[in-house]
Image (cartoon, rainbow, N blue to C red):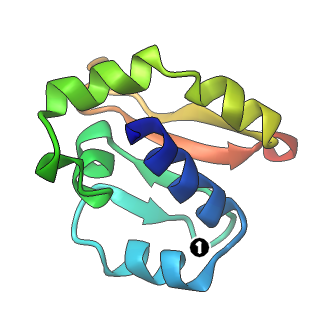
Amino acid sequence: MLSENVLDLFRRVLNSDPVTIKRVHDFNGDVHVMDTEVCLVFSLKGLYKFIGASESGSYAGFRKGLYQSDLNQQLQDAGAVIEIFQSTGKIESNLYCLKRLQDT
């Protein structure tokens, strides 16, 4: 399931999994890890491309699936939160940040 793939990625980043962190650093798109803290910064389109969702469905379906999932609750249960990192006023171009709750 899509939200499980995203949640798995987020958990791996939060746990500083070296293979995942390297994949993020090597990715050419709007997904990167802040070097000063464990914070995954991403756009929704960047996340869509990074997890390979484009191979299994449309971007609109990806967004809809994220918004309809309980991802935020699962992240909160795992001690993390997604915040707006940089607002452009448009969902398409906003940058978001996955952070540990104690970092907020």
Q: How many marks?
A: 1
Give left or right: position of 93 versus 54: right
Image quarter for residue 8?
bottom right
Counting from the top left corner in percent of width and height, residue 97 is at 54, 44
Task: Please tell me which residue lies in front, 81 or 53.
Answer: 53
Task: Please tell me which residue lies in front, 21 or 96.
Answer: 21
Q: Residue furthest right?
A: 102
Give left or right: position of 20 versus 75: left
Image quarter for residue 18?
bottom right
Give left or right: position of 20 versus 104: left
Counting from the top left corner in percent of width and height, residue 90 is at 26, 19
Q: Which residue in the structure is indicated by mark 1? A: 35
Counting from the top left corner in percent of width and height, residue 67 is at 42, 18
Image quarter for residue 29?
bottom left
Relative to 48, is 52 above or below? below
Relative to 37, is 6 above or below? above
What residue is at 12 percent from the left and 33 percent from the top?
58
What residue is at 59 percent from the left and 73 percent from the top?
35
- Which structural element holds mark 1? loop
Question: Quadrant of the image for the N terminus?
Answer: top left
Counting from the top left corner in percent of width and height, residue 52 is at 24, 57
What residue is at 40 percent from the left and 26 percent from the top?
66
Give left or right: position of 8 versus 5: right
- The amino acid type of the residue labelled 1 equals Asp
